[in-house]
Image: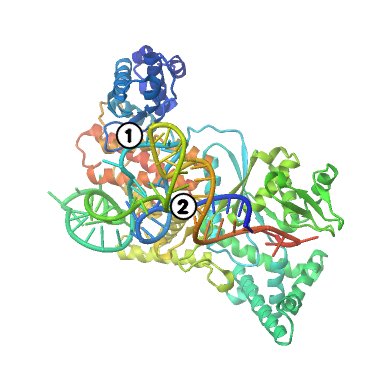
Amino acid sequence: MCKTKELIHQNGQPKAKKCNFAAKLIVKMDIIGILSNKIETAVQSLFGVSDQAVLQPTRKEFEGDYTYVFFGLVKSLRKSPPEIGNAIGTYLLDNNDIFESYNVVQGFLNLKIKNTVWVEVLNDLLKTNTGSEIERLSQSVLVEYSSPNTNKPLHLGHLRNNFLGYSVSKILDAAGYDVTKACLVNDRGIHICKSMVAYKHFGNSETPESAGIKGDHLVGKYYVEFDKAYKSQIQELIASGSTEDEAKKAAPIMVEAQEMLLKWEQNDPEIIDLWKKLNTWVYDGFEKTYKKIGVDFDKTYYESDTYLLGKDLVEDGLNRGIFYKKEDNSVWIDLTDEGLDNKLVLRGDGTSVYITQDLGTTDLKFQDFHSEKSIWVVGNEQDYHFKVLFAIMKKLERAYAEGCYHLSYGMVDLPSGKMKSREGTVVDADELVDEMIATAKAMSAEKGKIEDLESEESAELFRMLALGALKYYLLKVEPKKRMLFNPEESIDFQGNTGPFIQYTHARIKSILRKAEVADNQIFTLDGVHILNPEELELVFLIKDYDTVIKNAAADYSPALLANYTYELAKTFNGFYTQHSVMNEENANIKYLRLGLIKKVAETIKHAMGLLGIDVPERM
RNA sequence: GGUUCCAUAGCUCAGCUGGAUAGAGCAACAGAUUUCUAAUCUGUGGGUCGCAGGUUCGAAUCCUGCUGGGAUCACCA
């Protein structure tokens, strides 16, 4: 048995040639690394120069698996491209046993790997559990996402946030980090007081039970009621001679809300009771929504606990001369050297602003978890805020400042334009999900796929498909880009969609059931196998899966994983139409295909899992 | 106005650290089922990669400027 690492370091081709298990060596290191290595050796011994070999998959219109681009050598060696390419190609074939052939087109050297090597690659893939080869990094990361306000229910924008946060957590975990999912609930402030005031006036003591409305929606209803009353009071005041600005400040209901906020801060028992009652309703509602959309948290912070934090931190910064005080006692920091402005960190009266409590909460999070990295999944309207926050942390010499990252994502627009809560154009999360489930049911009925539409199992399938469609739709777009939510497209089950991938999985599982392949069955290839082009394409994709996970983690981008999974599913469907598994007469080939498609199904399931999407056994 | 992000087919989006004739899906049209699920597959048409320069063997990709759009620049959160 060969010791892979030593062989690689020696670059000893003759020695590697003797080894009958060359392919094992390839899998352990990754084939691109091996190839680059061999090419670099070839270039070194042929021309006496070192070149970092850049490899890419060979384009379909050319013969080969990988392409070495050597334009760089043409100039320095002052030889013609064919001369160089042929020399390297010949050398590689003469000194290695893994190449089948090569061809040279301009500055491109296309290399074809022996089919037997690919079979060994597949064989190695079949032995390992999908995703299990990635080593743990013994680094922890805290991912904060969702972070709702408690005055209204979740909407479409929150869904993008939740799906992103959950998926990124999963991806980071798969990439080797220890992940903690956190949520910071904004449960205090003027917004919830508005709902409280309106409820007090117009609520008639109704409850979610008496009204038959989910708690978060009920509280949201009073938030809207507040706004209505507020607006009409403003109009009245303007009619009786006030300016608009005066009216906005003097409207009795607004004055009342502000008084209520003060009373809340003074712990007025009656106000606290009301606050607790409404918030409990909201949490109850949120809980149902989170459960339905399949996201959760390991740790929940409440702003009512943290909003006073950060003042000691300001004091500390002041003592160290990092902050400065103005005549009115307000505290500031000068960030002009960072390309930012002067920023207020504490009011003249000693009360906090947004950034104050965020400074404190950030410290708290690191005290609680000592994580190397901390990620905030927050919309791009807060880009500036996070620049400021991180810059301050750096100036305060917090060791963790380097590990802070704002995962900024773009807004979700509707075909009709932007979502605006005041204009009632917001897409409610609960309604949306319910509609999608109903659509999934209707489409299944139409296709005649499901026999019993009313069973528990079917209900679970419809939920799976609906959420698969929705999550995939929102995650396939690169996070930082703003995106368009087209309701009709989002419930589409064809093409680049979640259900397309789910269907592919179900199809494979159907074959595996028919073949009575157990979930834990291990396939070991030991006969003579030749992979056909469609099989080879699948192997080619699957062997890259771990790299895709790592890239997605490095970029905090579920989109990378979504695109990969789609590609894999599409490639499988191409294979499926051209080759039969169950009707294959050659037992060796049938066995290989069963192993291969099982691996495809496992990879799809794993990848979709990292997107927070479940896949069905049948559909 | 300052800062910042974005601009690729009719629409929605890919395009890895610069590489070969820029790819998918949707929509349109034409096909494929005696064969493991047709929620599938195959084909056709569709592009001055916002514009103009620059860097080099080579640019959708990097640099500069411009145009258009979003966000932000609160003692709001």
Circle 2: element type: loop
Tell me the subunit letter for badge 2: A
Packing grade of label 1 (10 A; few <14, some 14-19, many >=20) is some
- Residue B33 in the image: state x and y as whole percent: 17, 53
Choose between A35 and A86: the one closer to the eye. A86
Quarter residue A534 falls in: top left
Residue A130 shows in this picture:
no
Residue A357 makes an appearance in the image:
yes
Question: What amino acid does circle 2 point to?
Answer: Val
Viewer-side residue, A368 vs A534: A534
In the rendered image, residue A336, in percent from the top left (x then y), is placed at 72, 47
Which badge, 1 or 2, comes first in the chain's sequence?
1
Quadrant of the snapshot with the C terminus of chain A: bottom left
Q: Chain of mark 1?
A: A
**Whole-percent x and y of residue A593?**
29, 37
* Residue bearing the label numbered 1: A58
Q: Is residue A352 above or below residue A430?
A: above
Number of residues whose C-alpha sits closer than 10 Å to that of mark 2, classed few (under 14), some (14–19) or many (20 or more) = some
Say which residue label 2 marks: A477
The N terminus of chain A sits in image quarter? top left
Q: Secondary structure at mark 1?
A: loop
Residue A467 falls left or right of residue A619? right
Q: Nearer the viewer, residue A313 or B7?
A: B7
Q: Nearer the viewer, residue A459 or A474?
A: A474
Query: CB atoms at circles 1 and 2 under 8 Å apart?
Result: no
Amino acid type assigned to the residue bearing label 1 in the image: Thr
